[in-house]
Amino acid sequence: MIPRYSRPDMVAIWDPATKFRIWYEIEAHACDAQADLGVIPRANAEAVWKAKDVEFDVARIDEIEAVTKHDVIAFLTHLAEHIGSDEARFVHQGMTSSDVLDTTFNVQLVRACDLLLADMDRLLVALKKRAYEHKDTVRIGRSHGIHAEPTTMGLTFARFYAEMDRNKNRLEKARWEVATGAISGAVGTFANIDPAVEDHVCAKLGLRPEPVSTQVIPRDRHAMFFATLGVIASSIENVATEIRHMQRTEVLEAEEFFSKGQKGSSAMPHKRNPVLTENLTGLARLVRSAVIPALENVALWHERDISHSSVERGIGPDATIHLDFALNRLAGVVENLKIYPDNMLANMNKFRGLVMSQRVLLALTQAGVSREDSYRLVQRNAMKVWEQGADFKTELLQDPEVTAALSPAEIEEKFDLGYHTKHVDTIFARVFGAN
């Protein structure tokens, strides 16, 4: 993973030294359990812990693997170099490589998930703060990119908060999904190892025993995990796309913070580009790219094959590191986003009251005009605004068919902005709670 899109705590989870440390802990805890059962001598189990402060030599393990062509055997050989070959003779007793590899992978995913959940907490705090800050800041809502009806900037942030809160709930479930371990031996039958060993190791690592591991932990769990990361990435892109739109020169309702000394273009000194949210759009694509391979990993041959292995060596670090970076970048964007309420109001009024068309339509139907005729009357006046730059309210007041049904005061009342924001508090209570 390139440093540009990496944060040190997440990178550390996927460092080879971290992986080998987890391998060691699995083997050492398994030896303790085997000794408790009387399968191996207690002295041998205790001897394994002589390596508890050892910094395993990654280069040495790689050197051994170059000969053995097997990473777990290379590690076990290196471990024996530290604790002695006789003391190490009961290490890995009754186990298979997948017991170590799969359990370690899930430990790493759980740790990664804990960081991602903390990232989401930061983002949720930022979204909530901006939502309340701009709860009553009126802006135009858009559908198909076209002016629709008034809303508020606070509701926009509240919508994103609710979406990310759902994502946090999904991520908590995904964490639970992958928090399993397997120490069940070849083809998962426990023929050469007691299930109590699995119970002990999982308890020490904060995992649940996998009910049926078939030598590998079922990959539907991981498919769900990476699919959840993909959904979160799409939500990040959802927020980023809205900010990118708001920063367009013709809109300029908000923009990313532009720091002193920052440059927007090597050619055009005037430029202030939405580079952070564009970057987030790209990072979302990278995270989502892990989803299909994770789904394809579910179908393995019989009790196991290793077609999933090379995939997970890539998507495990890539997806979690990218998402960790993206969530923190988005939180920073939201925290520092520059918002321009005056521009929002100017944009909404650009078409001179046109966005109040539905209120007039409904008022005409309430006054006894058929819906078809009401639509026709409102639309013909609205088209004058589009095509001639007319003022919508003025045109309505001059239309005898409209004024035959609605008084000037009734027409005037339909242009009250407060009508569109009267339920903002209700929506906020649904999103953030009554208090």
Image: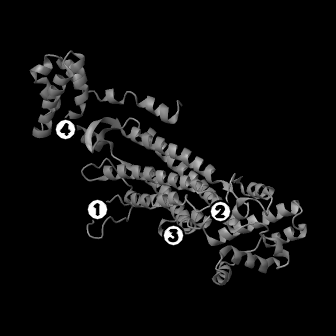
Residue 244 in the image: above or below residue 94: above
Disc 3 vs disc 1: which is toward the camera?
3
Residue 356 in the image: above or below residue 215: above
Mark 1 or mark 2: name the one nearer the start of the chain: 2
> Of the numbered discs in the image, which one, if any, rests on residue 325?
none
Left or right: residue 249 versus residue 289 is: left
Residue corresponding to mark 1? 271
Residue corresponding to mark 4? 351
Q: Is residue 324 visible?
A: no
Assess whether mark 2 and mark 1 are in contact (beta carbons under 8 angstroms): no
* Residue occupying image coordinates x 82% and y 65%: 31
Residue corresponding to mark 2? 102
> Of the numbered discs in the image, which one, if any, rests on residue 1?
3
Disc 1 vs disc 2: which is toward the camera?
2
Give the Cα distance between marks 4 and 1: 28 Å
Q: Which amino acid does label 1 sit on?
A: Lys
Mark 2 or mark 4: name the one nearer the start of the chain: 2
Quadrant for residue 425, please give it: top left
Q: Where is residue 66 in the image (x, y as percent from the top left)?
A: 63, 83
Mark 2 or mark 3: name the one nearer the start of the chain: 3
Mark 4 or mark 3: name the one nearer the start of the chain: 3
Mark 4 burial class by Cα count in 10 Å: few <14, some 14-19, many 20+: some
Give the Cα distance between marks 1 and 2: 49 Å
